[in-house]
Image: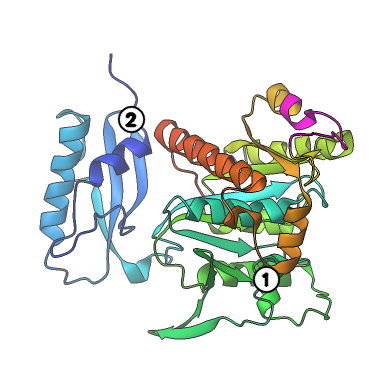
C-alpha cells in the first residue's frame, strides 16, 4: 500500500543533492521552498543566488533523480521544478538552525527563565551547539543569570547588514534586550515596539549553525508569542509550571495556544519546576511545598510528556543571582535533574522530527 507523500518526504529526498563545489545539500542551504503536493504530483521552487548559476541544470536533474529514487518512478516531478532567484524571495531567517524551541509558561513566577537557561547549558554539555534568545522583553533576566550584565554584544558587517554577535558563556550563545537597556530603566513600549525588538534579536543575531535555539518567552500569551510564530517556524514548545493548582490552571491556556489550528506548534511536554524542597543538610528529604506531582498529573490529563521534575534547592536561586547556572555543575542534585531534562527534550525532538512535518510559520491574512 502506497503512503501519502508529505513535504518531509520531499526534503528528506533532496538532502541527497549537494550543491556542486560545497559540502551542504540544497535543503540545508534553504534552496528548496514552496513545496506543493497533489497526489503523485510534486512541485517546488529551487532558489538560486544568481540567474547565471552554472549548476542550474545539474541541480534540477539531480533533484528529479533523488525524488524518484526515494518516492518511486511514478512520482510526477519532471517539469515541476520552478527556478527562482534570491532577490525574488524573502531572505530566510536562521537557515542553519536545526531546532527552535519555545520555552513558555502560563503565568509568571514559576521559574521559566531559570529552566530555559539551565536547559540551554545542559544541552550544550551534550556537545550540541546551542543558542538562547531572551524574548521576555519587559522582564529580561538572562544577562543576570549568566553573570553578563555589564557585557555588550559586539557587531560585524556582512554586506549591507549589521549583525549582532551573541554573548557566549557555558557553551551557550545568547542575546537579550537587557544588553541594550540600562537595568534601572523600565521599558515602556507598546506591543509593536516589543515585537520589533524580538524580530531584531532573531534576524540580526549572528547565530550561525546551531543544533538548538531556545526562545525564553514572556509568561502567559501575548503579542510576543504571535510575533514569534509569525517570524520563524518553531519546532516545538516546552511548558514550565509548578505543582500548585493556580499555576496549572494557566498551563492549559498556554498548551491550547500552541496546539490551536492557527499556530500548530507541537508541545514537547511539561517541566514541573519547584517539585519539592530539599534542604542542603538533608539531601534525601523531600518537602512538597507547592503540592505533590500536580504537573505530572496535568501532563497525563493533557496527553503530554512530563519532561522533568526540578527540585527547589537553595543553590538554584544562588546560582541565578550569582550568574552561575546550576546545570554548570552536572554532578549536583540540580545538575543531574537538568541533564535528565535535556535528554528527554532531545528524545522528544527526535521523535517529533521523525514523525511530523516541519512546522510552518503562521501566515496572517487580512481581508
Give the main secondary structure of the magenta stretch: loop
Along the line of sight, which residue is nearer the eye, 232 or 316?
Answer: 316
Residue at the location (39% across, 62% down)?
209
325 w.r.t. 302: above or below: below
Q: Does the image show residue 367? A: no
Q: Residues within 10 Å of mark 1 (few under 14, many from 20)?
A: many
* Front of the two marks 2 and 1: 1
Residue 230 place in picture, x, y as percent: 59, 55
| Residue sitting at the far front | 281
Q: Quadrant of the N terminus?
A: top left
* Mark 2 or mark 1: whose residue is earlier in sequence: 2
Along the line of sight, the residue nearer the viewer: 300 or 66: 300
Q: Which residues are magenta?
A: 284-297
Q: How far across and how far down the image is residue 314, in percent?
A: 79, 52
Q: Residue at x 86, y 35 (%)?
A: 244
Q: Residues within 10 Å of mark 2 (few under 14, many from 20)?
A: some
| Above-or-below relation of 206 to 315 | below
Dot 1 corresponds to which residue?
A: 143
| In-image side of 340 versus 298 (left or right) | left
| Identity of the residue furthest to the top in this view | 1
Q: Which residue does the numbered mark 2 point to in the structure image?
A: 5
SS for dot 1: helix
Amino acid at each position: 500500500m502506497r503512503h501519502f507523500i508529505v513535504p518531509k518526504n520531499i526534503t528528506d529526498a533532496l538532502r541527497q543533492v549537494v550543491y556542486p563545489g560545497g559540502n551542504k545539500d540544497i535543503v540545508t542551504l534553504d534552496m528548496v521552498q514552496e513545496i506543493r503536493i497533489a497526489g503523485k504530483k510534486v512541485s517546488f521552487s529551487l532558489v538560486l543566488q544568481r540567474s547565471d548559476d552554472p549548476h542550474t541544470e545539474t541541480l534540477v536533474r539531480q533533484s528529479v533523480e533523488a525524488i524518484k529514487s526515494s518516492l518511486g518512478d511514478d512520482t510526477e516531478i519532471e517539469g515541476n521544478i520552478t527556478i527562482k532567484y534570491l532577490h525574488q524571495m524573502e531572505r530566510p531567517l536562521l537557515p542553519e538552525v536545526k531546532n527552535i524551541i519555545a520555552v513558555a509558561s502560563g503565568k509568571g513566577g514559576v521559574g521559566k527563565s531559570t529552566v530555559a537557561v539551565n536547559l540551554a547549558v545542559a544541552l550544550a554539555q551534550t556537545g550540541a551547539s546551542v543558542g538562547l534568545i531572551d524574548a521576555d522583553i519587559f522582564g529580561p533576566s538572562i544577562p543576570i543569570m549568566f553573570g553578563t550584565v555589564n557585557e555588550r554584544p559586539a557587531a560585524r558587517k556582512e554586506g549591507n547588514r549589521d549583525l549582532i554577535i551573541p554573548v557566549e558563556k557555558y557553551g551557550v550563545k545568547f542575546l537579550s534586550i537587557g544588553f541594550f537597556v540600562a537595568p534601572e530603566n523600565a521599558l515602556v513600549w507598546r506591543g509593536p515596539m516589543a515585537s520589533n525588538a524580538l524580530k531584531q534579536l532573531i534576524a540580526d543575531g549572528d547565530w550561525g549553525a546551531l543544533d538548538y535555539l531556545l526562545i525564553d518567552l514572556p509568561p502567559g500569551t501575548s503579542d510576543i508569542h504571535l510575533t514569534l510564530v509569525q517570524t520563524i517556524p518553531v519546532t516545538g514548545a516546552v511548558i514550565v509550571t509548578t505543582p500548585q493548582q493556580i499555576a496549572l490552571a494557566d498551563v492549559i491556556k498556554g498548551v491550547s495556544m500552541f496546539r490551536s489550528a492557527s499556530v500548530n506548534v507541537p508541545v514537547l511536554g511539561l517541566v514541573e519546576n519547584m517539585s519539592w524542597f530539599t534542604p542542603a543538610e538533608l539531601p534525601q528529604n523531600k518537602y512538597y511545598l507547592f503540592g505533590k506531582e500536580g504537573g505530572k498529573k496535568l501532563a497525563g490529563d493533557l496527553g503530554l510528556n512530563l519532561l522533568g521534575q526540578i527540585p527547589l534547592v537553595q543553590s538554584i536561586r544562588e546560582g541565578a543571582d550569582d550568574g552561575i547556572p546550576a546545570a554548570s555543575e552536572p554532578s549536583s542534585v540540580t545538575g543531574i535533574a537538568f541533564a535528565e531534562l535535556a535528554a528527554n527534550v532531545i528524545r522528544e525532538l527526535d521523535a517529533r522530527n521523525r514523525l511530523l512535518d516541519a512546522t510552518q510559520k503562521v501566515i496572517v491574512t487580512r481581508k
